[in-house]
Image: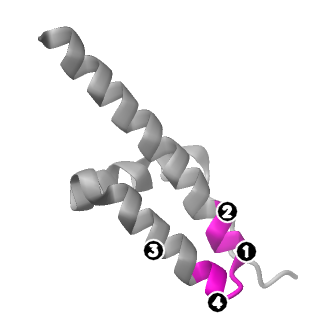
């Protein structure tokens, strides 16, 4: 049996991304970078990969929100 944590499923990654945006707003990228750096220093490869996947979703959500705002003006 493996001691590795389970891989987050797609909807959990999206939920994490939304939570990061709600908690950190436009500072979300900085928060994610800090998490990735800390996990990398700890040697947590799986954690780094998870946060990179969350970062991709944060980017997509942020891009979508900016596109929506541009079409309103």
Q: Position of residue 67 (x, y in %)?
A: 31, 20
Between the residue at mark 1 and the residue at mark 3, the CA separation in whole angstroms equals 15 Å
Read off the residue under disc 2. Answer: 49
Between the residue at mark 2 and the residue at mark 3, the CA separation in whole angstroms equals 14 Å
Crowding at label 4, few (<14), some or many (≥20) Cα neighbours within 10 Å?
A: few
Magenta highlight: main SS: helix
Asked whether 41 falls inside the magenta stretch, the response is: yes
Read off the residue under disc 1. Answer: 45
Asked whether 7 falls inside the magenta stretch, the response is: no
Q: Is residue 31 left or right of residue 72?
A: right
Determine the residue positioned at 42% across, 56% down: 16
Frontmost residue, 9 versus 53? 53
Query: Which secondary structure lies at badge 2?
Result: helix
Q: Position of residue 37 (x, y in %)?
A: 55, 76
Q: Which residues are magenta?
A: 39-49
Read off the residue under disc 3. Answer: 34
Quarter containing the C terminus: top left
Q: Earlier in the sequence, mark 4 or mark 3?
A: 3
Between the residue at mark 4 and the residue at mark 2, the CA separation in whole angstroms equals 13 Å
Between the residue at mark 4 and the residue at mark 3, the CA separation in whole angstroms equals 12 Å
Query: Which secondary structure lies at badge 1?
Result: helix
Read off the residue under disc 4. Answer: 42
Q: Is residue 25 left or right of residue 17?
A: left
Query: Which secondary structure lies at badge 4?
Result: loop
Farthest residue to the bottom: give it: 42
Quarter containing the N terminus: bottom right
Query: Which secondary structure lies at badge 3?
Result: helix
Q: Is residue 47 left or right of residue 31?
A: right
Examine the rendered structure and indicate whether residue 49 appears above or below residue 71.
below
Q: Nearer the viewer, mark 2 or mark 3?
A: 3
Examine the rendered structure and indicate whether residue 63 appears above or below residue 40.
above
């Amino acid at each position: 049996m493996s001691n590795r944590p389970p891989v987050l499923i797609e909807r959990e990654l999206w939920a994490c991304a939304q939570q990061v945006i709600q908690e950190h707003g436009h500072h979300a990228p900085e928060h994610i970078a800090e998490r990735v750096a800390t996990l990398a220093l700890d040697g947590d490869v799986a954690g780094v990969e998870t946060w990179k996947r969350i970062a991709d979703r944060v980017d997509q959500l942020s891009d979508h929100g900016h596109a929506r705002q541009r079409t309103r003006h």
